[in-house]
Amino acid sequence: MDQEPAPHHQARLSAQADIYTGSRDQALALPIQSLVTREIKPKPGEVLKPGAPRDEEGVWLFSAKGKTQFMAVKTGLLGISMWRCWTD
């Protein structure tokens, strides 16, 4: 390109843009640090099928009674510091 820029263009200009990558209804935004992976342990007498997942992603929930429960979630869009997650 041997053309000179148009006289109304100036060097060092900047712009700001919002980029839409997708959305999902009924999704939660979870901090990246809250998402954990745990091994799927078969029940006594159960054998995992070949090729079946060996681990799952999820979060630990705490009830008002102080009990914990693991909830598996599916991850989707990743933001700067948040995952967009949902359950089936």
Image (spheres, helix red, strand yellow):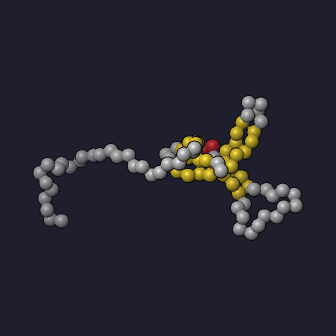
Seen in the image, is 34 located left or right of residue 7? right
Viewer-proximal residue among 33 and 19 = 19
Res 54 visible: yes
Can you give x and y, in whole percent of width and height, for residue 59 in the image?
A: 67, 44
Can you give x and y, in whole percent of width and height, for residue 41 in the image?
A: 79, 56
Res 36 visible: no
Seen in the image, is 5 located left or right of residue 53? left
- Tell me which residue sits at (68%, 49%) in the image: 72
Q: Is residue 4 above or below residue 87?
A: below
Question: Which residue is situated farthest in the front direction here?
Answer: 25
Give residue 33's quadrant in the image: top right
Q: Which quadrant: the N terminus?
A: bottom left
- Tell me which residue sits at (59%, 47%) in the image: 85
Viewer-proximal residue among 32 and 56 = 56
Can you give x and y, in whole percent of width and height, for residue 69 in the image?
A: 74, 42
Can you give x and y, in whole percent of width and height, for residue 29 in the image?
A: 56, 42
- Tell me which residue sits at (76%, 67%) in the image: 49
Instruction: Count how many numbered circles sit on residues in the image.
Output: 0
- Tell me which residue sits at (70%, 61%) in the image: 53
Seen in the image, is 57 located left or right of residue 16? right
Question: Which residue is situated farthest in the top direction here?
Answer: 64
Viewer-proximal residue among 16 and 25 = 25
Question: Which residue is situated farthest in the right direction here?
Answer: 45
Q: Is residue 25 above or below residue 40?
A: above
